[in-house]
Image: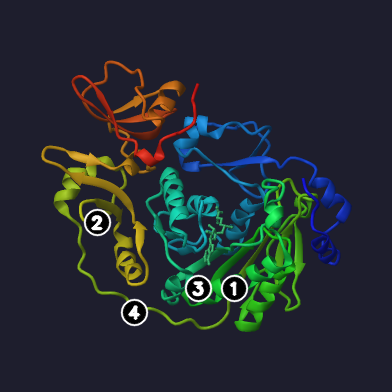
Amino acid sequence: MKNIPASLLHELQSVKGFNEADFLAAHTLPPPVSVRINPAKEIGLFATNERIPWCSNGVYLNERPVFTLDPAYHAGAYYVQEASSMFIEHMLKNVLLDKKGLRVLDLCAAPGGKSTLIASLLDKDSLLISNEVIRTRASILDENMTRWGHMNTWVTSNDPRDLGRLKGYFDVVVVDAPCSGSGLWRKDPRALDEWSQANVQMCGERQQRILADVWPALKQDGILIYATCSYSPQEDEQILDWLAGEYKVETPELAVPGEWNIVPVTTGNGLTGYRFYPHKVKGEGFFIAAILKKEEADTLRPVRFKPANDKKIQQQAGHLLRADDLVFIQTDKENYSAMPAGHEADMHLLQQAVYLRKTGLKLGKPAAKEWLPEHEVALSIDTNANIPFVEADREQALRFLKREEMGISGLSKGWQIIRYNGLGLGWVKALDNRVNNYLPKQWRIRMDIE
Ligand code: SAM
């Protein structure tokens, strides 16, 4: 690895928990590999692996496998995520205390690490809005959230300012901010080339802009989670101090066991954040804080809407799902989606401010004599277990994921889900003399599977 910039090392000398010799030594070691298991798609993977202490479903792996060649990864059985950032689970559990029916925004969400984790923590009446402003990254986010399988995670692709128009709507806003990225140098040494104090300064200004834009969307007594993967105080403690200067805020007390080696830091304005150093934890550089909004927030007027449950569609497509109390709604020109009845009002309210890219569970559309199912149904955790399926072995599953001939004979005719270890991967339709593969082209594995 190239030399770590002297100006950063110099600046960190006075920051709590920093030790130059240990920090540099940690940068000669490879980054640990970790994954987080999807508790809603638990198939007994990694059962004996070392656990990540601050995340109930996080485990370390001894080496980095080729994840692309594991069909369980494509089925959403786990997410590959850096260990330090999984601390958000401990933080949310401490501050939310199992509250139900929450409205949560993950503002800078792609590729979906924090969003998949938050989705696993929320009850089914809660709603998570995963937003990513950059369109190409929003489609990766969409794929990852679809794999995770929760219909109460919706995807938007808007500027923070648009979300700020949803005044006082969210109980929790997560800002995992774009940053100078010094905490991830072990994973991506090329990022060292792009690092400069000028960039740190630019990132700090952008972080303030993002926070100011989204702040109106947070409720009074709501919680802002602010995180970066930068060591620079300008992007961490100084941002908390900036928040304290602009707004009325507090940081709640968190119980963090000392043996986890996470370093609590107190800012000039008396707020608390948490630093993760690679020489202290088995993970990468990370900073996170939970901030309570202690000031009044404007609120939105409820929208009036005509409930639009389509009973005919419910009859045609209802058998695909096992969840009840759902409404079946047309969400674009042709397609229908299902969502809990309690989320229909949210859809109308959100539509006033943002473009809803993924809303509820996309079911597909009716055709002349059948229902044309959407890919999402195969990956959903609410899919009806009675839908015809074929259990594929690893090689057959990988062939399906490459959109190649799978080599499965004797399929009964019609639509079926291809499963791997009991988890859905996608649809096929068996005809008299061939099997059509309905995996969306953009999901296809491009790697050699031999
Ligand atoms: N939360 C993600 C996760 O856990 O997988 C990682 C988020 S990454 C640190 C920051 C994200 O912010 C990137 O996806 C980036 O595209 C997005 N971003 C960049 N500029 C932004 C801006 N001006 N406003 C909001 N988000 C921005």
Q: Give the structural element (helix, strand or loop) at label 4.
A: loop
Query: Crowdedness of circle 4 by 10 Å Cα count: few (<14), some, many (20+)?
Result: few
Pointers 1 and 3 in contact (C-beta within 8 Å)? no
Q: As rendered, which of 193 and 188 lies closer to the eye?
A: 193
Q: Amino acid at mark 2?
A: Asp
Q: Indicate which disc, 1 or 3, sits on the residue closer to the N terminus.
A: 3
Q: Which mark is residue 214?
A: 3
Front of the two marks 1 and 2: 2
Pointers 4 and 3 in contact (C-beta within 8 Å)? no
Q: Give the structural element (helix, strand or loop) at label 2.
A: loop
* Residue 147, x across and y down, in percent: 43, 43
Q: Give the structural element (helix, strand or loop) at label 1.
A: strand
Front of the two marks 4 and 3: 3
Residue that carries the numbered disc 1 in the rendered image: 292
Pointers 1 and 2 in contact (C-beta within 8 Å)? no
Q: As rendered, which of 364 and 251 lies closer to the eye?
A: 364
Quarter-of-image position of residue 354? bottom left
In the image, 232: left or right of 385?
A: right
The residue sitting at 46% across, 51% down in the picture is: 141
Residue at mark 1 to residue at mark 4: CA–CA distance: 23 Å
Q: Amino acid at mark 3?
A: Val
* Residue 181, x across and y down, in percent: 66, 57
Residue that carries the numbered disc 4 in the rendered image: 301
Residue that carries the numbered disc 2 in the rendered image: 332
Residue at mark 2 to residue at mark 3: CA–CA distance: 27 Å
Quarter-of-image position of residue 288? bottom right
Residue at mark 2 to residue at mark 4: CA–CA distance: 25 Å
Residue 119 visible within the image: yes
> What colour scheme does the image use?
rainbow
The residue sitting at 68% across, 51% down in the picture is: 184
Q: Which mark is residue 181?
A: none
Q: Indicate which disc, 1 or 2, sits on the residue closer to the N terminus.
A: 1
